[in-house]
Amino acid sequence: MTAQEVRLCGLLLQEHFGEVVERIGTHLLRGGAQNLRTIANETNTPLDLVKKSLCVLVQHGACEFRSGRRGPGSPVEYRASCERVLRVLRYPRYIYTAKTLYGDTGELIVEEVLQRGHMTMSNTVKTVADRLTHNMEEGRSMEYSEVVSAFSKLVETHFLQRCPPVAEVGTAATSATPATPGTPAAPASTAPPTAESNPDCYKLPHVTLIGRGKRRRSSDDSEEQRGGKKAKMDSESCGDEGIYWQVNFERFHQHFRDQAIISAVASKMDQTSSEIVRTMLRMSEVTTTQTAAYTQPLSANEVFRSLPPNYSISRPILDQYLSLLVDDPMEFVGKSGDSGGGMYVVNLQRALANLARATLESVVQERFGSRSARIFRLLLRKRHLEQKQVEDFAMIPAKEAKDMLYTLLSENLVQLQEIPKTPDHAPSRTFYLYTVNQLPTARLLLQHCYKTVANLIERRLFETKENKRLLEKSQRIEAILASLQASGAEPEQLTEVEEMITAPERQQLEALRHHINKKKNPENHIVGFFMNLFVNYGGK
Amino acid sequence: MAGRGRGRGRGQMTFNLEDVGIGRGDSLPPTTFKPSPLFPPMPVQPVPLQTGEEVEYMLALKQELRAATKTLPFYIRRAAPKRDVDRYSDKYQSGEIKDSTIEWSPDWSRLPKELCIKVREQGKRPTPQVKRTKKPLVGKEEILTKLETLEKKEEAVNSEEEQDEEKKKTNEEEEQADEEDYEEDFEEDTDYIMSYFDNGEEFGGDSDDNMDEATY
């Protein structure tokens, strides 16, 4: 929970939930677990607003509550989680992945669940069907059953999961009657239940949803109200009350990790080898736990059988490919035995570590030049080197090598390690070695990424505020144009309206839009994502 | 004796300079007298941004998400601060956001009890007469709530909340429904039903037609 992360979380909360939630959220992030009164007093916010914000945060999974630490009588404590808020940055990526895997229906389902935090299945199905119907032509509407099938596919592949059941905290504890059976006292020492601990985590409820999406017309407001009331009554009769679904972020991360490995193999070797690795990963999707260092061993026979039919390669060629993959210095695939034609595993942790290392090297190259990158790579491989050795191995003149080393040292990408020769660490009798620690350096880059994203968000907000007048004017012009076109105006009128924005204004507007749109560029995310994965795996 | 080495070439330091790499006769870069500039000129230009269909699509998604979250009920806005004087129309304009109500109805069983606040109804449904007369006018609560209509609206809501905390959990929903019913009427600050209210705009018009009767 570094300062940069908290700052970025604050900006994200402000954008999505408003300033009140931002204040409460950052206070919780900075201060750890607190109870309701403390939050209200320390942030000087009225109690009702604090309650509302906490409801929003809990709804979206950013905050958890548990009974107080001082025994069963103490008030409920709330704790916010930085990581969960930072995931908001990746929402478009999740939605896009769902689109590529399950089409528009899947995309809308994931988008709805992400926006609302968690939802029941019936609610999701209805909302998505309505949205799809809205986008279709007149007279057609979306069947609920199609949406239900997309939903069940998402659940089967574990992209959606049930929300964990909530322990009875602070609900029954306030009524002091000890004779109420059936409400077990929540032991204060247990961790809040995770989603995975629920055995029904991926079980669909037995609900039959029959119907079609309703097309909402803007003219029937009263009908919509009545329709809304009717929908509420329908959902009460659906029978899946209390079963809420949330997005399983870990599964998406697993998917991104697999994609990263496959694309790395494809760019390093060729398409066929990437297909082989993709097959191996697909086969071990369900058998591998999330933090496993490598997949379960697969025999070459199994891989051969499971290859996609359009990649029909013969058995000896497959063996050759596999041995090439094993011999590759990036160590994507390893051989763990010889039975069944050779047992192969995909080294997940090793592959991620190598990918992170490659990212580090490319960052150094882009920022400091290729010679500094050479020094950096040298240090990565040789671990500890003296100043003189660096010059010799890198084949760079002494003065320049010294300069580059000091630049890298000042940026904290390279560290100095002291090795004393004598028990009193006399400086004249101590070795000073340059070294690179991969994990702390990766963490450092990750924090840089967060800082960059936060700066970009602030810049975007600043630019939007500065040019508010211009943006509003262009919005109004567009609205006028649209309405004129809808009512079939003549071209002269249209051009007249368009000319209301002068040319320099238009240019300025275009540049502004360009800047605003390009903020929060995805590159940061790719880098940040790798670093995040790598750091979480705690690998070397 | 002390300070013998001072002033000769570079100062003596506790470690050997050559080990770190500063050889004899090398000149060090000039010392700096102020902190480094806030926006130093960049020696290399950054790599251009990624473009492509995927990236454009994700950018569009991001913009849509940002716009959509502003309209969802999860976007909490503070209630507008009270104006200096209570206006008469405040009683009849109830469409504004209040601090004490929440715009969406979460599943209260998944939240701790202390977070429970009144859910704001979207568009009040007029309570039928029958329902009201069926409720027995039982002593304490009714008198209390009637007394409190003389005070301001916020205090009325606060006292409801206090009463909430006193009652047991099982009675809570009933009472909330009760108080909501009572509050609907009391928000109008009259004993009359809203639809019967005539705000007197057409008062002046009618009297011009019947000039037979004398106007007093």
Image (spheres, rainbow, N blue to C red):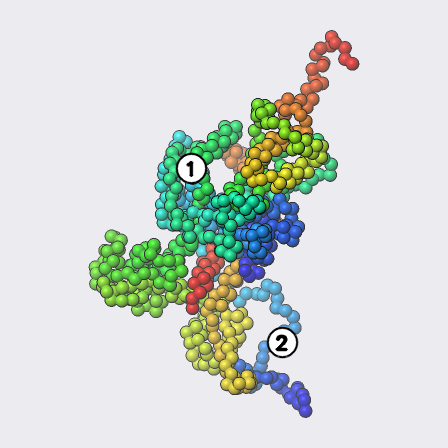
The mark closer to the camera, 1 or 2, is: 1
The amino acid beneath tag 1 is Gly
The amino acid beneath tag 2 is Thr
Where is residue A145? Give x, y as percent: 36, 37
Q: Say which chain tag 2 marks.
A: B
User: Can you see residue A510?
Assistant: no
| Of residues B178 and A221, the one drawn nearer to the viewer in this rendering | B178
**Relative to A441, does residue B179 appear above or below in the rendering?**
above
Q: Secondary structure at mark 2?
A: loop
Residue drawn at x 48%, y 58% as measured from the top left: A524
User: Can you see residue B22?
Assistant: yes
Residue drawn at x 71%, y 10% as measured from the top left: B210
Where is residue B119? Give x, y as percent: 57, 38
Residue drawn at x 53%, y 44% as measured from the top left: A179
Residue drawn at x 69%, y 22% as measured from the top left: B200
| Of residues A48 and A422, the one drawn nearer to the viewer in this rendering | A48
Q: Say which chain tag 1 marks.
A: A
| Of residues A479 and A405, the one drawn nearer to the viewer in this rendering | A405
Residue of label 1: A239
Residue of label 2: B31
Where is residue A217? Give x, y as percent: 48, 31
**Relative to A377, does residue A285 appear above or below in the rendering?**
above
Residue at the extreme bottom of the image, as rendered: B1
**Distance between the alpha carbons at the discs numbered 1 and 2:** 75 Å
